[in-house]
Amino acid sequence: MPPLNRNRALRLAFALTLLVATPPVGPAAQDQPIIRTEVQQIFVPVAVASQAGEPVTDLTRKDFHLFEDGVEQEIINCAREEVPLNVVFLMDISHSTFMELGAIKKAVRTFVGALQPEDRVAIITFNNEARLILDWSNDLARLDRALERVVPKGSTVWYDALYVTYTDLLPAVRGKKVIVSVTDGWDTASLVEFDDILRKATVSDTQVYIVSKTAGIRDYAEYYKREYGLKYDETRIMQIMYAADSQLRKLAYETGGRVIDPRGAGSIEEVYSRLVRELRQQYYLSYTPHNIMRDGQYRKIVVQVDRVGVRVSHRPGYEAR
């Protein structure tokens, strides 16, 4: 299957060509944004936990109150385990993963083995390019064949992998959508920037869960700093990891997902096993907003629960496009 980012790069180049070749329009036309009106359901995955962190799974629709920009909305649906999962695994197969790629493959297989028959997964690998190696399946034999061909090498196009996931893979998918990845967030060769990804993420209703290696790499750099004195390489690595960690947390927060620190959390396989259970225990709310203007403005979402002593987490809003 050809690399996904090749077609995307051609589309980007063509779009840039149009921007250069198209004569400027008059001031009146430039000052008038295109605003659409469209009735569209908004989907909001919601996790509810006790103060001890245990999932609360006995809530019904009447227990939830959902607000958009301060205005309470009517919740149309409130589902939980019956909602099929559509999970995209973004697998970093750059040269830096050669020591752990076997464990990541095993973890992906464990995750897929725990899914329900109606659930589906897709896998995009990324090093010098983003490549779709499994296109929406839950067949373990197909998964094994796809993973057997994966060899670590090359650089890291983390942003490009996210871009093609949002642009090429997810738009036609209905139901609950999740992106899962093990990464340090250190992008070395992408054609797009993080801000481009964040804009895509705030429009999509896809949660992002990241098993982050940034803290472990920072610990490694700190060790060398203590033992051998501060060197330029260690200083630069720590700066890069702090910046990458900030981006990963921003992406997870804006999508209603989270960043998972694997230190002390067991193996990657154990982390993935807990994650699939967590996704199954979430509530999946949907509503039709009172404000139907698709004007590109940000809409803030707040979900409240009629239950004392619980913690509620969800994406904070979306761009109305």
Image: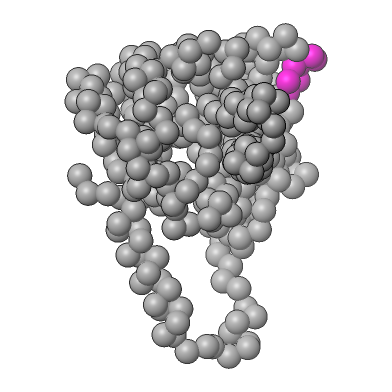
Where is residue 132 shown, x and y percent of the image?
A: 29, 41
Per the rendered image, the range of residues in magenta is 305-311
From this viewpoint, which residue is outermost toward the right? 308
Which of these two is toward me, 246 or 61? 246
- Report the coloring of the rendering: one colour
Q: Residue at x 40, y 30 (%)?
A: 97
Where is residue 254 shown, x and y percent of the image?
A: 63, 41
Quarter of image, res 37: bottom right
Where is residue 241 shown, x and y percent of the image?
A: 61, 38
Which of these two is toward me, 149 or 163? 149
In screen coordinates, is 50 left or right of 220?
A: right
Q: Residue at x 42, y 33 (%)?
A: 96
Which of these two is toward me, 257 or 286? 257
Q: Residue at x 62, y 37 (%)?
A: 234
Q: Is residue 206 above or below residue 115?
A: below
Q: Is residue 164 above or below residue 272?
A: below
In the picture, which quadrant includes the C terminus? bottom right
**Res. 287 visible in picture:** no
Where is residue 100 shown, x and y percent of the image?
A: 40, 22
Which of these two is toward me, 32 or 277? 277
Q: Is residue 245 above or below residue 313?
A: below
